[in-house]
Image (cartoon, grey):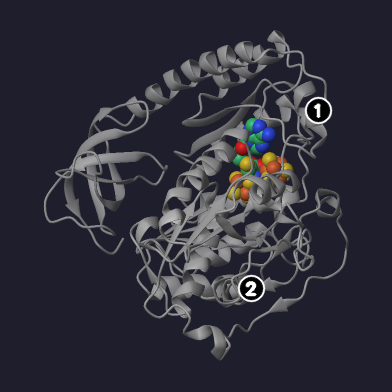
Amino acid sequence: MKIKSDWILPDLKAAQKRTKKAVPYINHFELEDYVRYIGKGKKYYISTFGCQANQRDSETLAGILDAMNFEPSESPEKADVVLINTCAVRQNAEEKVLGQVGNLKRVYRENKDLVIGVCGCMAQEEKLVHTIIDKYPQVRLMFGTHNIQDLPNMLYKVMYQHERLIQIYSKEGEVYENLPVHRFGNNKAWVNIMYGCDKFCTYCIVPYTRGKERSRTMDEILKEVNELKNDGYKEITLLGQNVNAYGKDLSADYDFATLLAKVAETEIPRIRFMTSHPWDFSDAMIDAIAKYDNIMPFVHLPMQSGDTDVLKKMGRRYTAESYKTLFDKIKNRIPGVAISTDIIVGFPNETDEQFQHTLDMVNYCKFDNCFTFIYSPREGTPAAKMEDTIPMEEKSKRLAILNQTWNKYALEKNKQYEGKVVKVLVDGPSKKDPSTFTGYSPENKIINFTGENIKAGDFVDVYIERAKTFSMDGKALCYNKNK
Ligand code: SAH
Ligand code: SF4
Ligand code: F3S
């Protein structure tokens, strides 16, 4: 397939470089007249894979499309523009995306005006982009994580000049404030506090797909939180690949603990944050979580492995011992805190003994929730070049043992709630059983419950009758809309 001269293709080597150059902040977004009405009478559909950063980006994509007068569509079949916002973190995430792009071929055959766009983290990967260029002609637009603000202009070119356009920058550009946003939730909202990642854990593609760490200013974040509060939002989640690094690129007076305190003082009812790395998790952060009632007693603390040598090879910058010390400190200083984690099994050459150390750690920490993965080599990362002698069958076996182990503790933890009352922020009727409602406790536990006159966004006191591994069942006692 011929590469056109005006295409911009990703380059992982360039994406790996970091410079000290200050990042410009752009506060102004305005649509030019030639793109403002191109969505009139047309519809869009966005499909989102991956983490919360991608969810939040999709809300910006939707906001920009709304501003161009497009309307949302319930299905890709009825849409004029379909955007697939992709994740590159593991091979199976990529396979899911390619499956969906493949399925859209049929829709494209029936509507040759359909614009199918692929964006997000997979678009930042060289090999993947070439695969799409060669094998998926139905994809007419590809752009990356650094230029979503150019969507109007890119769409205009594809729609009116009948081009196939690929525009992927390998380096982060400006931090854009005030891009339009169409929030998908009415009660819970994502708030970016920083973009990118500089940790370069050896297995991870994110620092290449998301660029260097760039923090938003405290003023902008607080403005957004206050607006959300005034709009009636009940919960916000502060987002960053590693929130502990917040502000370090801006000035010495900026840190995450200070930001947490200031966000808490807005008095928005519930505050969460994602993700905090065990390295650099400061005492001041623990104090802030303990001090403010509206910062939820829940910490996601990715461990990855319980073996110090594996952690070193992963480039995680902490040891099994220091993880344990931090874990104990958080448990002891924040009453009732729940802690969840991420674990990778089958990192190149992980021995039985090293895997056993991970299990030992799970037996010690008894996590409330675990997200467990088989290591997936990502091209361009240092770990992908490591020789690996562990067969996939063995890795799958380890994953099953790990899951069995943590599931047991998750159930045990949830059992401690039986007979107690928890305050639930209601998401709405349960998808599985519309006669019951579902929502989350402060500790991020999923609670399904029965009750009357309840709607999404209410705070409800729920009496827990039965604990399960992944959720709990109960009944509403009373509800208080405002707290
Ligand atoms: N910034 C977050 C993680 C984002 S990716 C943090 O550091 O905690 C979410 C999780 O995916 C990681 O915690 C890790 O457990 C997993 N992950 C990342 N790269 C992976 C890979 N190559 N193979 C398997 N799991 C991976
Ligand atoms: Fe990936 Fe590590 Fe950055 Fe998390 S901190 S996004 S695991 S490189
Ligand atoms: Fe996936 Fe990109 Fe998030 S790789 S996990 S969508 S930052």
Secondary structure under badge 1?
A: helix
Above-or-below relation of 225 to 376:
below
Q: Is residue 217 left or right of residue 212?
A: left
Q: Nearer the viewer, residue 91 or 173?
A: 91
The answer for how far apart the CA atoms under marks 1 and 2 are is 39 Å
Q: Is residue 259 left or right of residue 351?
A: left
Is the CB–ligand 1 distance for label 1 below 8 Å? no
Q: Nearer the viewer, residue 184 or 342?
A: 184
**Residue at screen point 83% across, 70% down:** 22
Which numbered marker is on residue 313?
1
The spot of residue 70 in percent (x, y) is 42, 75
Secondary structure under badge 2?
A: helix
> Tag 1: residue type?
Lys
The spot of residue 139 in percent (x, y) is 57, 55
**Residue 182 found in image quarter:** bottom left
**Residue at screen point 61% across, 20% down:** 361
Above-or-below relation of 331 to 289:
above
Label 1 or label 2, whichever lies nearer to me, is 2
Which numbered marker is on residue 45?
none
Q: Nearer the viewer, residue 260 or 8?
A: 8
The spot of residue 225 in percent (x, y) is 49, 70
**Residue at screen point 67% across, 20% down:** 346
Q: Nearer the viewer, residue 91 or 403?
A: 91
Q: Is residue 283 left or right of residue 318?
A: left
Mark 2 = which residue? 150
Above-or-below relation of 349 to 158:
above
